[in-house]
């Protein structure tokens, strides 16, 4: 018997059976699982896309999703289904850990000609990778001695476009120190535009963690920031994601999760490192 309890139709013409069909399909394609409590949110987004595509009803729209060769509609729906809520210097203690504890360990084992590679996923609208770039420039004394590459990825193509533009609301920059704000941003009306130099310091890419073809070339990273993403996955999807991160990291590389997430409950491939600033996870050096 299904654990899903049928709920009244929220008025979008999408039945409980339709919801279950879509939930399974979306999970298989993205790794994101919607609980029954998210029914109204999912139905609302589906109804908007049904109207936009002119497919008329769920059956017609679901057929489009499954069989459209280009996959364009699935991407547009994914964009509308993903939540992007963040701001600059969120959970700042991890950035402090990066410059005070993680990077000093990394550079001990690196040739000066090798770049330090950092991967942020999900990128959301760019606040996290740009925060890392600013933090390195302002807080890491060795920044001028090393080539640092910051790659930031997301499944949502519309949010990636916003990230590349580098324009932010007052709320997004509310915790940025005044000196940094003056140095790296320009006020434009009621928004702030990030400097071109900082925008160019981050490369943004589209990645679906559930698609091996998307992640196959993501290798040789020293640090991964994956904060507040795994909470949207079920156990199987979390395991798939952590296996991907293991392959993407250099031996001894580090991964930073959100404050409510724990790698210890997901995978034995990483060991816990308790630094003064934060708890992070390190790729084990033993053979799998």
Image: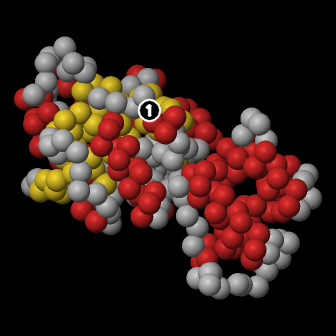
Q: Nearer the viewer, residue 54 or 278?
A: 54
Q: Residues within 10 Å of mark 1 (few under 14, many from 20)?
A: few
Q: Nearer the viewer, residue 219 or 157?
A: 219
Q: Residue at x 24, y 27 (%)?
A: 116
List the residue tagged with mark 1.
Answer: 216
Answer above or below: position of 153 versus 64. Answer: above
Q: Position of residue 271 (x, y in %)?
A: 16, 53
Answer above or below: position of 135 versus 282. Answer: above
- In this picture, residue 171 sits left or right of residue 283: right
Answer above or below: position of 94 versus 45. Answer: above
Q: Residue at x 42, y 28 (%)?
A: 217
Answer above or below: position of 113 versus 65. Answer: above
Q: Residue at x 10, y 37 (%)?
A: 105
Q: Position of residue 78 (x, y in %)?
A: 64, 50
Q: Residue at x 38, y 43 (%)?
A: 244
Instruction: Tell me, yes or no, if residue 265 can be seen here.
Output: yes
Instruction: Tell me, yes or no, if residue 131 can be seen here.
Output: no
Q: Quadrant of residue 69?
A: top right
For the C terminus, give its image quadrant. top left
Q: How many marks?
A: 1
For the N terminus, give its image quadrant. bottom right
Q: Nearer the viewer, residue 163 or 186?
A: 163
Q: Position of residue 239 (x, y in %)?
A: 38, 56
* Label 1 SS: loop
Q: Position of residue 27 (x, y in %)?
A: 59, 58
Q: Quadrant of residue 231?
A: bottom left
- In this picture, residue 64 sits left or right of residue 82: right
């Amino acid at each position: 018997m299904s654990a899903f309890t049928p709920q009244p139709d929220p008025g979008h013409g999408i039945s409980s059976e339709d919801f279950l069909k879509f939930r399974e399909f979306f999970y298989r394609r993205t790794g994101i699982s919607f609980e029954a409590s998210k029914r109204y949110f999912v139905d609302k987004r589906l109804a908007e896309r049904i109207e936009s595509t002119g497919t008329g009803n769920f059956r017609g729209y679901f057929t489009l999703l499954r069989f459209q060769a280009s996959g364009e509609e699935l991407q547009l729906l994914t964009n509308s289904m993903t939540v992007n809520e963040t701001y600059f210097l969120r959970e700042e203690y991890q950035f402090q850990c990066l410059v005070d504890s993680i990077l000093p360990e990394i550079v001990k084992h690196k040739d000066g000609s090798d770049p330090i590679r950092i991967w942020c996923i999900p990128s959301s609208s760019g606040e996290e990778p740009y925060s890392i770039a600013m933090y390195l420039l302002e807080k890491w004394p060795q920044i001028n001695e090393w080539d640092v590459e910051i790659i930031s990825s997301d499944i949502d193509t519309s949010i990636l476009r916003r990230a590349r533009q580098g324009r932010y609301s007052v709320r997004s920059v509310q915790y940025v120190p005044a000196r940094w704000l003056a140095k790296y941003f320009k006020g434009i009306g009621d928004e702030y535009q990030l400097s071109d130099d900082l925008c160019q310091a981050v490369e943004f890419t589209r990645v679906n963690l559930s698609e091996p073809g998307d992640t196959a070339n993501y290798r040789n990273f020293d640090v991964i920031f994956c904060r507040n993403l795994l909470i949207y996955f079920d156990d199987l999807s979390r395991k798939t994601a952590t296996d991907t991160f293991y392959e993407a990291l250099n031996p001894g590389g580090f991964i930073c999760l959100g404050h409510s997430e724990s790698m210890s409950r997901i995978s034995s491939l990483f060991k816990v490192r308790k630094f003064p600033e934060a708890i992070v996870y390190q790729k084990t050096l033993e053979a799998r």
